[in-house]
Structure formats: structure tokens, C-alpha cells
Image (tube, rainbow, N blue to C red):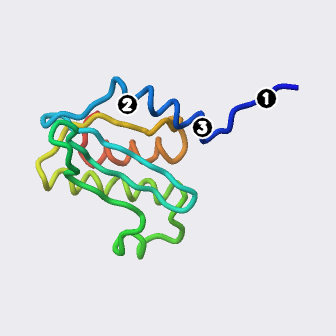
Amino acid sequence: MVNKKVRSLVRAEKHRRIRHTLSGTPERPRLSVFRSNNHMYAQIIDDVAQNTLVSASTLDKDIKASLEKTNNIEAAKKLGSVIAEKAKAKGISAVVLDRGGLIYAGKIQAFSDAAREGGLQF
């Protein structure tokens, strides 16, 4: 019988390995994405100063009001465009994408494409 690891543990290990080499600087901060079963969260983080520069999630009132569901591809696109607008307002144009160990498909890809269309470079 084949024993498979729990998917959440595989994601956590992958995220730990990625974070070992990936870091945000003041010139190019880290765009961190987290996806739960019900919502998506995004933060732009300066790892040198250890502070969050910009954040957005599908829990925000203005985003949540414009969405029918908060855990689908449309919600990911909306979140990507909102985080790009907030980053542009803070003067951030280039970031490093930290997808949190998640595969680059579906919601994460939709989020990334919307953020790129909004003006972020990564």
C-alpha cells in the first residue's frame, strides 16, 4: 500500500523551501499570496524592514461587496487588480511573487495575471 503525504503538509514543506531562497527587498518587495477554503489574502512585504507595505483580501468590505463568491477565479482576479492599485499608490512597481507553495494554476494564475495587468512586474 502506498502512503501519501497530506496535501497541506506537502504545501507547507514546499513553501518553506521556496522561502529559503526568496526574499523581499525595499526595491523589490515580496508579494505573498495565501488561499484558504473561503478567502484569498495578499500582502506586499519588505523582509529587510520586516513590515507589510500593502495588504488586501476578499474579506475587505469593498471587495466582498462586489463579489458573488469569495473563493473562485473571479475573486482572485479582483484581488489581483486591487493589490496592484494599492501598490501603485504606494509607489511599488516591481515585486517578487511568493505563491506560498501553491501550484501556479487556477486561482493563483488568475491573481497573478490580474496583478500584472494592473501594472505590477514580476
Which quarter shows the C terminus? Answer: top left
Sequence-earlier tag: 2 or 1: 1
Residue labelled with disc 1: 3
At x 27% / y 39%, what residue is drawn? 30
Q: Amino acid at mark 3?
A: Leu
Sequence-earlier tag: 3 or 2: 3
Q: Secondary structure at mark 3?
A: helix
Mark 2 neighbour density, 10 Å: few (under 14) some (14–19) many (20 or more):
some
Sequence-earlier tag: 1 or 3: 1
Q: Amino acid at mark 2?
A: Arg
Q: Position of residue 40 (x, y in %)?
A: 45, 56
At x 46% / y 34%, what residue is drawn? 15
Residue labelled with disc 3: 9
Q: Position of residue 91 (x, y in %)?
A: 11, 48
Cα distance between the residues tagged 1 and 3: 14 Å
Mark 1 neighbour density, 10 Å: few (under 14) some (14–19) many (20 or more):
few
Are the residues tagged 3 and 2 within 8 Å (C-beta)? Answer: no
| Furthest-right residue in this view | 1
Residue labelled with disc 2: 19
At x 36% / y 25%, what residue is drawn? 20
Q: Position of residue 58 (x, y in %)?
A: 42, 64
